[in-house]
């Protein structure tokens, strides 16, 4: 079970993702060549710090409201409709986090609380388990065609640590969801995001549109995707869908004779974020398993319609349904699609139809859960893969795991005269750091394959940036690579080994780490603590100790990016916590170089040059711009309620 269920709660609204973009170029991680301009907005002449160098990393849900509910696939009046889906009311919002500057296509949401409330009382509060987006599609929006503004992606996860209100206001949906969650204390949730603004002069800068659904969760199911029927488009040479319809998932509930599909991240958008008109759309079962996309077939001969036409052109359909379409099945229809592909058909004159999209060849699907891994040197990464055929587990089948070829342009940007001076490091090397790869796995009776990756210290292969990024490609026996979305892989950030010093010092151990984060996140250094300055850090010792000691899942945990190894975190905390015999904090400064024994020791400066105090007039305007937009959205929220 998952959010794609006949029991579900649907919501829609806005989100804010105030990401910092200084770290979009891996070369900005090199302290030795970092330039002040990398903290400025991009210009026509230079990328500088890209489109939002002063971002805070915050992720928020704004003005999100319950739009509809489904209980046993009956959309009834329910008291939960109109309630707000909000974030925490006792701590900061969540964070949007990249895995690595050389792998920015699996961005994840961390530290997010989901709260269902009427503004006076809470009916449900849960923690959103960190999840990275899947099935990103660039160019989904008609205008603008490219970049983040035209992209769409989905985050699927589970809600944990659930707290239910005493009074569920007689809501059949909430009562049913609570009963379903009592088995394991979890719910399934899906967020689909699109219409994001990267224009710093726009009112909606860092804001976008979100639709979502919450449903039951089964422990035997994956957390980050639906184990069901995988709909696969034909792709052009760049990996983009030819018919402008993205990958999407379906689910056949044989017990209830239902088929459900999620089109929320699939159908193309207009410039105004409505759905483009593709004519009459029909979900169908194909009679010939070899039918190709774009073929024109006759109703009843080439395909069997399932239910009525999909009412996607109904005003506000996407918001009120989250793109989920459900229809009941007749016995002969259920028999057909057990071993035949589903398809999305564009109905033509004369009861003919054109196949816009069809299920994967032979119904095969392989996907990895927990596909993004942060791993300490010598730790073992555990990943579970789910393999199915027409939605049913596929046992005793071979899955191959292989390295992606090494690469070094990844994570760069400007290559012209204003390009950063540092060189881009190579990824996916050394392969020996992941000990037991490549290999082949065999699925068990439940159609699962468990991958265990033992690791060793990669040995700082990238120099100025910690650890190494690895992309592991998985392939199913008998399935072509074109049947998978281009980012369906496993991504491993393996940290460097790092011996925790007995008595760490600022100059040797702490400043190189802090300076890097100060460079990459200027909003922190310019508004709170100048991480490159010893005196500023000393003055704010207590708050830094708190932030670095918090659980990595906490939204206040430092660093925002979750790319600091446990050993380096332990080193920082040891330095921040060391006290002398009188209980005073030592905060050892150290020396840049060790002089011969007996020689007079050099006295070092207590601060290191930082850009934090060099505030530009432009920074005053832009620093709070994202938060101003957040307040604008809240004001609208209050006026609408």
Image (tube, rainbow, N blue to C red):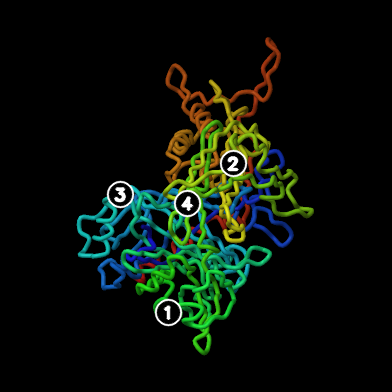
In this orientation, does residue 193 appear?
A: yes
Q: Position of residue 617 (x, y in %)?
A: 62, 56
The residue sitting at 53% across, 41% down in the picture is 374
Q: Vertically, is 628 above or below 562?
A: below
Is 456 drawn above or below residue 14 in the view shown?
Answer: above
Residue 174 occupies which quadrant of the picture?
bottom left
Label 2, label 3: how far apart the Cα atoms are: 36 Å
Badge 1: residue crowd in 10 Å (few <14, some 14–19, many ≥20): few
The answer to whether the residue labelled 1 contacts the one labelled 4, judged by CB atoms less than 8 Å apart, is no
Please report whichever mark, 1 or 4, sits nearer to the chain's N-terminal start.
Answer: 1
Q: CA distance from mark 1 to mark 2?
A: 46 Å
Q: Which residue in the structure is indicated by mark 3?
A: 185
Q: Is residue 30 left or right of residue 632?
A: right
Q: Residue at x 43, y 65 (%)?
A: 338
Residue at 54% over, 67% down: 246
Q: Which residue matches tag 2?
A: 439
Q: For mark 4, what is the residue?
A: 386
Please identify, in this view, whether the residue under mark 1 or under mark 2 is nearer the observer.
Answer: 2
Report whether 32 appears left or right of 509: right
**Circle 2 Cα neighbour tier, 10 Å, few/some/many (<14 / 14–19 / ≥20):** few
Q: Work out whether mark 1 precedes mark 3 in sequence or the reverse, and give the earlier one.
A: 3
* Circle 4/circle 2 CB separation < 8 Å: no
Task: Residue at the far top: name it.
Answer: 598
- Marks 1 and 4, Cα distance to the nearest angstrom? 32 Å
Q: Is residue 613 visible?
A: no
Among numbered discs 3 and 4, the one appearing first in the sequence: 3
Q: Nearer the viewer, mark 1 or mark 4?
A: 4
Disc 1 secondary structure class: loop
User: Which is more N-terminal, label 2 or label 1?
Assistant: 1
Pointer 1 residue: 311
């Amino acid at each position: 079970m998952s959010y794609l269920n006949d029991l579900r709660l649907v919501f829609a609204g806005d989100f804010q993702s105030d990401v910092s973009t200084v770290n979009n170029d891996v070369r900005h991680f090199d302290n030795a060549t970092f330039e002040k301009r990398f903290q400025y907005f991009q210009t026509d002449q230079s990328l500088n710090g890209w489109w939002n160098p002063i971002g805070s990393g915050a992720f928020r849900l704004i003005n999100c409201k319950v739009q509809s509910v489904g209980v046993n696939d009956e959309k009834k009046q329910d008291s939960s409709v109109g309630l707000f889906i909000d974030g925490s009311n006792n701590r900061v919002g969540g964070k949007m986090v990249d895995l690595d500057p050389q792998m920015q296509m699996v961005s994840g949401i961390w530290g997010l609380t989901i709260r269902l409330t009427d503004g006076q009382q809470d009916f449900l509060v849960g923690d959103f388990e960190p999840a990275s987006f899947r099935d990103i599609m660039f160019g989904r929006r008609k205008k603008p065609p490219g970049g983040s503004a035209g992209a769409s992606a989905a985050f699927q996860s589970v809600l944990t640590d659930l707290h239910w209100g005493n009074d569920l206001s007689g809501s059949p949906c909430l009562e049913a969801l609570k009963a379903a969650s009592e088995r394991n204390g979890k719910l399934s949730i899906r967020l689909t995001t699109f219409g994001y603004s990267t224009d710093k002069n726009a009112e909606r800068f860092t804001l976008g549109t979100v639709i979502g659904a919450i449903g039951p969760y089964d422990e035997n199911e994956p957390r980050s995707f639906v184990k069901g029927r995988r709909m696969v488009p034909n792709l052009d040479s760049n990996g983009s869908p030819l018919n402008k319809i993205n990958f999407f998932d379906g689910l056949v509930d044989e017990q209830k004779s239902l088929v459900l599909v999620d089109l929320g991240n699939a159908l193309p958008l207009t410039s105004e974020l409505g759905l483009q008109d593709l004519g009459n759309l029909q979900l169908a079962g194909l009679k010939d398993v070899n039918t190709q996309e774009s073929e024109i077939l006759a109703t009843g001969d080439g395909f069997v319609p399932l239910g009525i036409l999909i009412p996607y052109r109904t005003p506000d359909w996407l918001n009120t349904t989250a793109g989920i379409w459900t229809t009941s099945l007749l016995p002969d229809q259920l028999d057909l699609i057990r071993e035949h592909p589903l398809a999305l058909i564009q109905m033509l004159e004369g009861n003919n139809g054109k196949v816009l999209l069809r299920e994967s060849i032979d119904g095969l699907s392989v996907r990895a859960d927990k596909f993004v891994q942060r791993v300490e040197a010598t730790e073992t990464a555990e990943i579970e893969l789910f393999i199915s055929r027409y939605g049913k587990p596929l046992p005793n089948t071979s899955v191959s795991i292989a390295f992606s070829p090494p690469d070094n342009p990844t994570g760069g940007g400007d290559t012209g005269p204003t390009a950063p001076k540092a060189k881009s490091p190579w990824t996916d090397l050394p392969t020996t750091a992941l000990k037991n790869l490549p290999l082949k796995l065999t699925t068990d009776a439940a159609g699962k394959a468990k991958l265990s990756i033992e690791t060793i210290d990669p040995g700082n292969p990238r120099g100025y940036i910690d650890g190494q990024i690895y992309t592991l490609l998985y392939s199913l026996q008998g399935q072509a690579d074109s049947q998978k979305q281009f980012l369906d892989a496993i991504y491993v950030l393996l940290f460097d080994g790092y011996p925790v010093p007995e008595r760490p010092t600022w100059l040797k151990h702490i400043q190189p780490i802090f300076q890097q984060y100060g460079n990459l996140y200027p909003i922190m250094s310019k508004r709170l603590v100048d991480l490159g300055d010893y005196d500023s850090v000393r003055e704010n010792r207590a708050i830094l100790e708190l932030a670095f000691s918090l659980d990595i899942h906490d939204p206040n945990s430092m660093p925002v990016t979750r790319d600091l190894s446990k050993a380096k975190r332990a080193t920082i905390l040891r330095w921040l916590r060391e006290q002398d015999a009188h209980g005073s904090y030592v905060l050892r400064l150290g020396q840049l170089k060790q002089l011969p024994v007996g020689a007079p020791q050099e006295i070092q400066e207590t601060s290191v040059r930082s850009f934090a105090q060099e505030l530009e007039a432009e920074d005053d305007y832009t620093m709070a711009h994202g938060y101003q937009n957040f307040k604008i959205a809240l004001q609208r929220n209050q006026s609408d309620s």
